[in-house]
Structure formats: C-alpha cells, structure tokens
Image: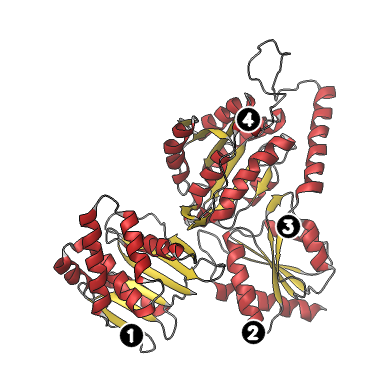
Amino acid sequence: MIKILLAGQGGQGVLSAGKFLAESGLHEGKEVTYLPAYGPEMRGGTANCSVIISEHAIASPLCNKPDVLIAMNGPSFHKFAPRVKSGGIIIVNGSVSDCYAGRDDVHVYDVAANDIAIETGDVRSANMVMLGAFIALTGAVKEKSIFNCLNEKFVGKPHVCEVNGKAFRAGMQAVR
Amino acid sequence: MSKILLHGTEAICEGAMRNGCRAFFGYPITPQNEVPEYMSVQMPKIGGVFVQAESEVAAINMVYGAAGAGIRAMTSSSSPGVSLKQEGISYIACARIPCVIVNIMRAGPGLGGILPAQGDYFQATKGGGHGDYHLIVLAPSTAQEACDFTYRAFDLSDKYRVPAMILADGMIGQIMEPVELPPMRDLKDIPEKQWATSGHYGKERRILNSLIIKPEELEPHVNELQRTYDEIYANERKAECYKTEDAEIVLTAYGTIARICKSVVDELRMQGVKAGCIRPITLYPFPDDAYAKCAAGAAKAFLSVELSLGQMVEDVKLAVNGKKPVYFYGRTGGNVPEEAEIIEAAKNALKKAEAVQ
C-alpha cells in the first residue's frame, strides 16, 4: 500500500494529477481511493488531495502520514513536509520552491517541474512532470498504465496527449 | 462488469437511477452539489425529471407529489437543507409515501461549516420532524456502498412504504473510488403501487393524505406505522463486524469514520491489543443484536467514535444494556480524528474498563 499526498496552488493541476494517478491504479485492477480536501477553496488558493493505491481493500482513506508528498509549491511543501512518514519521499517543485525540509529522515527530490514542463512544451503539464518523477521513484503504477490513461483521457486531442506524455517522461528522467 | 472511478455523490446518483429513480428535486448546498449537477445531466438521458427547486422546502414537497404518483423520486441536501425539509418528510412519512432523501452531512449546528460531520444522527434516526415516525436510515462508508445502498433504499422504501434516508458524511460525497455499477433496472420489473395517485382511469379513487383529524382514525394509523417500524426492526438490522469475535475493546462507528476505526483496529492488534469494530450499516433500525453479542462475549469495553459530541453512543448504550462500559470519543467542527487519537482513546477506554472490573 502506498499513501500519496499531492499539494500545491489551485490551478497547478494537483487534483487532476491525483485523479489521474487513481485512474491509473484502477487500470491495473488495484484498489484506490482519491480524497480531495474540499475546504472553501478558490482559484489561487491551496489545493491538496490524498491518493492511496493498494493491492488490498483500503480501510481509512486519510493520508495523515503519507509515504510520499508531491509538493507543487513552497507553502504546501513546508506545510506538509513534517507529516511525511520517516523514510518517506518528498518530491518538490524546485522551480518555485526551496528544498529544505528541516528534517533528514526523508528523501527530498528537487524537480524543477515548471522549467521542465516549459521545455517539453507547456507549463500546464508541470503536474505530469511531478507524476513522472513519482513513478520513476516508486513504481507505484506502471508507466504503461499512465500512458493508457493519458490516451483515454485526451482521446481526440493527440497534441495534449503528446505534451503531457513528454512532460511525464522528462519527469522520470529528472530523478534518474 | 469492470469498475469505474466515481465520486461518492455520482455513485449515489447511479444507484438511484439504476433502480428506477426517475425524478430528482434538489437545491444546491455544499458538500453535495455534485448530486444535482450529475442528475441534471443524466436524468434527461433516461427519460427522468430533474428540477432545481426554489428551495429545499419546495424540493421535498415535489418529492411528495412525484412519489405520491408512484414515481421513484429522490432529493438530496446537506445538514441545514435537510433541516428545512423536515416538515415535508414528516408529511411523507404520515402519508406512507416511499422515497429517498440523501443527507451528505456537514458540520453544524446552524449554517456551521462545509466540512465532514455526523451531527445529524439524532435528526435522521429519531424522526427529525414532528410526530411519531422513523425513516429507514442507511450509512454508506465507501463509494461502492453509496451506490449499492441508494439502490437498496428504493426497494426498502417501496416494500415498507416508509421513506428512506442515505446518511453520509462529507467525505463520502467527495471521495473517488472504484465502483461496480449494477445493471439498469427495467421499470417494468418494479412492482406496481396499488396505492399511488397515478390517475383515475376507471380505478377506485385513491387518496394520499397526512391530515387525519379524527382521533379515532389517527391513533390506529400511527399504531399501524409503529407496527411497520417493528417489522423493519425485525427484518432489516444490519452491521459489519470487523474482528470482533475475540475483541476486548470494541470500537464502533459508521460511514468514513468506521474505515478509520478499521485501520485503528489493525494497528492496535499489531500492538497486541485485541480490538474490533462494529459498523452499523442501518442506523435505523439500529443493529443492537451485533452489540448484544459482543457484550455477552469477550468485550471489556465499547468505544463509540463519532463526528459529533455523542449521539450514536446513546443507541450503543441501549444495545449494550449496561453489561459492559461504553465510552465515547468524538470530534466536531469539520475535524476528522487521526488514527493516533483514536488509538489513544481506545487504550484509555480499555484501561478505565479494566480499572472498574
């Protein structure tokens, strides 16, 4: 079982990345839950969601102590870094955040997601860069499931699909 | 059939539509706006009716009318909105019209907050509106159950001619999980309602009414309602018992909180504490048999965990009937307890119980 907390600024694709991850897990026949924080959020505010992928039935859908934190911006990195399980992984968007977690019992990966996404074609796919890094580090779902899901989601939009695919692959490379 | 990823709210809608719901009336309120949103798109596709009413009061009375005409009808709201519906629900209960009411609970009292809560337990299970009546109350804990229980609620409601309620916390509304959808039921398979005011057409005259002014008529009517509730109590109590056989500390919770409690049970067992969890599936009728069984067995203490300040715990106490101590742990305001909090509360409860023995 892997518990993932995705967090960032509203509009960065945090919730869609979480949903996408859950979809990909479901593609492999795994048990998944996706729980968005649904406070009185607004554009430009904070957004976060919890995703659990498991071989077995999932009891609690909460991720109070995630195995992995995917932080798309500085405020969410600093807010949630203390919660990550000891020995866990933090992937932080180095384009817009520092990478000092204030603890040395977690693995912090600095991924310049915005810069990489701009290079691969569209800054809006920074969330896919982060997902790429996540999959490369954890193998939580297969690369193939992500691409199957991408093709399904952006059917009839080959360009969007390609840009997101490129961003995802670049994210995988960034942590290798 | 393969599973698809659905919001809890969407799962509720699918469960309803697939079991013949063809009329939905609602008014927006967080955290259940996805229900009317989804219904507004889907209902026209299956020949159903969607109306965004001018208020919650109007919506429940539209349900009264549509369901009275024999259509399977549903309304959905969240706590303050469900309070507004109570007059209509009482009328519907008295007129014995089957329908389904969904309450995705938010934090109260008052307008409160929009985050998850379970503060409407009393309102849902003890009547809610005026007069002697009950609803059949089902409490889903997963998106799959949100679908399945809503599906089942329509059958139960029709069978007993008692309105049914789906009582869920805000997390059930927002969570996305894999759901296997039941097949779309043919409307012809749903038994015809011999009491429905579905047009005269040469039939005998049918009247649905909740005004029964003569005491010699109202009392037998209320007694008949009570007989139905007794029948429902005898037939429909349902709970999930998780690792309770040898449990010394029996946690109990419904909805999402029960899932957190199950994780707590696993963690406590890893620490060598014999823990279990009773999850009521029907909140009315309350599954008191499950508690009585544990109370007569290995249980040393019970702990009711709620997103309220102690509502279900009263039914737990009645069910345990003084045989073992019953403790309580709850959070409100939209806060959800972390596993560590519940673990500590469970250990404390067990310690207290062992001290008094």
Residue type marked 2: Gln
Please name the residue shown 85% across and 68% down the image. Answer: B296
Q: How far apart are marks 2 and 4 (CA)?
A: 55 Å
Instruction: Identify the image quadrant of the C terminus of chain B.
Output: bottom right
Task: Indicate the secondary structure of the residue bearing disc 1.
Answer: loop
Residue type marked 3: Glu
Q: Earlier in the sequence, mark 3 or mark 4?
A: 4
Query: Which residue has dot 1 on it?
Result: A102
Q: Nearer the viewer, mark 2 or mark 3?
A: 2
Q: Residues within 10 Å of mark 3 (few under 14, many from 20)?
A: some
Residue B188, numbered label: 4
Q: Distance between the residues labelled 4 and 1?
A: 65 Å
Q: Which chain carries label 3?
A: B
Residue type marked 1: Gly
Comparing A144 with A97, the one in front is A144
Please name the residue shown 28% across and 54% down the image. Answer: A43
Q: Which of marks 3 and 4 is in front?
A: 4
Q: Where is residue B340 in the image (x, y as percent from the top left)?
A: 56, 76
Query: Which residue has dot 3 on it?
Result: B314
